[in-house]
Image: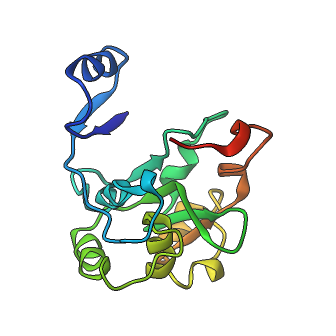
Amino acid sequence: MVVLVSDGVSDYAKKLLKADGWMVEMISLLANPNQVRPKRFWGVYTKLKIFNMTNYKKVVYLDADTIVVKSIEDLFKCQKFCANLKHSERLNSGVMVVEPSEAVFNDMMSKVNTLPSYTGGDQGFLNSYYSDFPNAHVFDPNIPEEVLKSRPAPEMERLSTLYNADVGLYMLANKYP
């Protein structure tokens, strides 16, 4: 497993992560271009860098507040881009599967200052970038590989809520620093 850390993470914390078996990769922060945004969203656009991790065939991204309760190896069967709808008809960027592409990343970077973000963060940007996401087909990990190879890969697929559902764990008082 790989963890991306910025220069704000201490050497001691990186040492602990390595001792726990993580591959630690340094990453520079990507500034949030939105002037109107929650204070805690200052570095969230950094998440977009997973789209440029071309040294990997597939990236399964999990927000730090994600709890994995069973095997997620099926996610590696997703094709170009998978995420789910959560709380609405909008894409949730807390659990995503990405087939890294320098071309897609560069296209995103060319649009970060022009595409709107309803959240003021990466999730809102991704909803604008993948504007047809609510109409994407639901990812089915049981489709045989021969069938997948016989047709064009979809640009995006929706994950079912089985991959990212609130199951009774809530932040008390909904307060953020």
- Locate the N terminus by quadrant: top left
On the image, the x and y values in percent for residue 92 come to: 58, 62
Left/right placement of residue 73 relative to residue 172 reads left
Q: Is residue 141 above or below residue 16?
A: below
Residue beneath the point at 30% across and 80% down:
113
On the image, the x and y values in percent for residue 135 come to: 64, 82
Considering depth in this image, is 98 or 57 the residue closer to the camera? Answer: 98
Residue beneath the point at 78% across and 42% down:
167
Considering depth in this image, is 33 or 140 the residue closer to the camera? Answer: 33
Quarter of the rendering containing residue 176: top right
Considering depth in this image, is 12 or 154 the residue closer to the camera? Answer: 12
Left/right placement of residue 82 relative to residue 10 reads right
Outermost residue on the right side: it is: 168
On the image, the x and y values in percent for residue 145 come to: 53, 61
On the image, the x and y values in percent for residue 8 come to: 24, 35
Q: Is residue 175 above or below residue 123?
A: above
Q: Is residue 8 above or below residue 92?
A: above
Quarter of the rendering containing residue 114: bottom left
